[in-house]
Image (cartoon, rainbow, N blue to C red):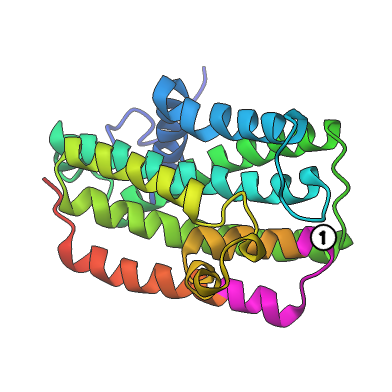
Amino acid sequence: MTATVPGTFTPRPGGAPLVRMVLAQGLLEAKLLLRNGEQLLLALVIPLLLLVAGVLAPGIDLGDARKIDVLAPGVMALAVMSTSFTGLAIATAFERRYGVIKRLGVSPLPRVGLLAGKTIAVLLVECLQLLVLTLAAFALGWHPQGGPGAIGGAIVLVLAGTAAFSSLGLLMAGLLRAEATLAAANLCYLLLLLAGATVVPIAEYPTALQAVVSWVPSGALAEGLRGLFTGAATAATVAGSAGVLLLWALASGIATARTFKWE
């Protein structure tokens, strides 16, 4: 007869360990985001169409460099912006409207765990986006320069860009109503796509606007990635782009902490 270990059948009420709760929340949010057709359109379909159309369509002038070498880093920056800013802002705003965040607030998952879960979901989706876009860019003839150093610098810029855009997205979602956030986030997405140096290099903008656009988060991220993968970037220029993004993350993070409404 097998001896029973004392306490084996004793009920153990309580929440799971914090790490397990955060991972579960992150995976759940990533699945919900990928199942949302509108979010998938912004996160993957539009960047992929821009990459393919920009390379194959005639009459598009992006300067002296090969179009794929200009477009690939810019479209990657657009993908980061679509997920960490537009998608996150819209999803969080509607979670506030439907009371999801309020109910999570009374669950064992603490607020820091909820934010960590959202961060994990954003990073998982970004990994999928960048993998698909990189494979598509290689298929279109992309030849990135810079070697492992460029990849390391790109990871730093993507993380800094994610922090900046996520903070801005949460700031918008915490201040505006859901419908207003939906409209404002999509409008900002279009404005930064068309006028934020996301796919068009800063050098192609009028001289008077170049300094302004370089301080916009989309311009800092895209121009930093373009410099890394064309071999034109130096440590100082990469640090400058990362610094601009971190300043946006710090400023909007502080504003979000002071103004975000959980219900």
Which residue of the protein is positioned furthest toward the left in this rendering?
A: 263
Query: In the figure, is residue 160 to the left or right of 223?
Result: left
Q: Does the magenta stretch include residue 237?
A: yes
Q: Is residue 100 above or below residue 236?
A: above
- Quadrant of residue 125 in the image? top right
Q: Main secondary structure of the magenta part?
A: helix
- The span picked out in magenta is 228-242
Query: In the figure, is residue 41 to the left or right of 148?
Result: left
**Residue occupying the point 68% across, 29% down:** 53
- Quadrant into which the C terminus falls: top left
Q: Is residue 144 magenta?
A: no
Front in this rendered view, residue 176 or 196: 196
The spot of residue 85 in percent (x, y) is: 41, 48
Front in this rendered view, residue 48 or 11: 48
**Residue occupying the point 18% across, 46% down:** 105
**Residue occupying the point 50% across, 46% down:** 193
Disc 1 on helix, strand or loop? Answer: helix
- Quadrant of residue 64 in the image? bottom right
Query: Mark 1 = which residue?
Result: 230
The spot of residue 151 in percent (x, y) is: 77, 58
